Image (spheres, rainbow, N blue to C red):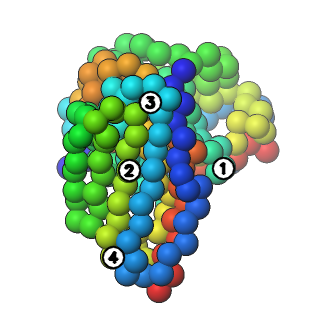
Amino acid sequence: SQELEQSPQSLIVQEGKNLTINCTSSKTLYGLYWYKQKYGEGLIFLMMLQKGGEEKSHEKITAKLDEKKQQSSLHITASQPSHAGIYLCGAPETSGSRLTFGEGTQLTVNP
Amino acid sequence: DTEVTQTPKHLVMGMTNKKSLKCEQHMGHRAMYWYKQKAKKPPELMFVYSYEKLSINESVPSRFSPECPNSSLLNLHLHALQPEDSALYLCASSQDFGVLREQYFGPGTRLTVT
């Protein structure tokens, strides 16, 4: 089954700092999703990556999928308290099948 | 608009009660999903409906009964639940199933079984 390892498990940064969250798979990824979740709330869709080497950006968040399609990174530039939450990566076991998720990265941004 | 709505937001029920969770989307999506999320854990898939037919049941106990009355609506009927079923229940939808698509989640229903 698809297993995704996220690192770090938690991250505390000062407002304005840049940060990176990683998501690694032992198998080739058919695609990779990034979500943000506030505790006890729903998942907010951030980005979906499909092709090796693909990079997408939305506001101050950039996600990349490596050429081998086994690792993705999520980079936040000039972090703000509004970026705080749990970041989850998710991947289908085959193209377009059920999603399994990593354990998540808890991000705290101190003002 | 990428909104998936869920009602109720919170639900407390006894082990002998029957209740239902409701999920709705108006994006024209033909795939809808139920996930269960325990505290500090990632969501786990329970059911997938594709074109109003059940495509995946992840060996979920029969006390959880999904229903898809039409392409916009997804229900989860609950009966004789156990305290360990207390969790956040998330609904999601995507344009279709079997192809890589954006999957959008609702805000969830926080269920407590007493």
For marks 2 and 4, give the CA distance: 16 Å
Which of the chains bears the disc numbered 4?
A: A
How crowded is the residue under tag 3: few (<14 C-alpha within 10 Å), some, or many (20+)?
many
Do marks 1 and 2 both belong to one polypeptide chain?
no
**Residue picked out by circle 2:** A73
Residue A99's tag is: 3
Dot 2 or dot 3, earlier in sequence: 2
For marks 1 and 2, give the CA distance: 25 Å
Please provide percent x and percent y for residue A56: 22, 50
* Amino acid type shown at disc 2: Ser
Q: Is residue A92 left or right of residue B113?
A: left
Q: Is residue A57 left or right of residue A5?
A: left
Q: Which numbered disc, 1 or 4, marks the residue closer to the eye?
A: 4
**Residue picked out by circle 1:** B39
Which of the chains bears the disc numbered 3?
A: A
Q: Is residue A4 above or below residue A21?
A: above
Q: Which numbered disc, 3 or 1, marks the residue closer to the eye?
A: 3
Q: Residue at x 70, y 47 (%)?
A: B112
Residue A78's tag is: 4
Q: Is residue A82 left or right of residue B78?
A: left
For marks 4 and 3, give the CA distance: 30 Å
Q: Are marks 2 and 4 in contact (CB under 8 Å)?
A: no
Q: Nearer the viewer, residue A12 or B9?
A: A12
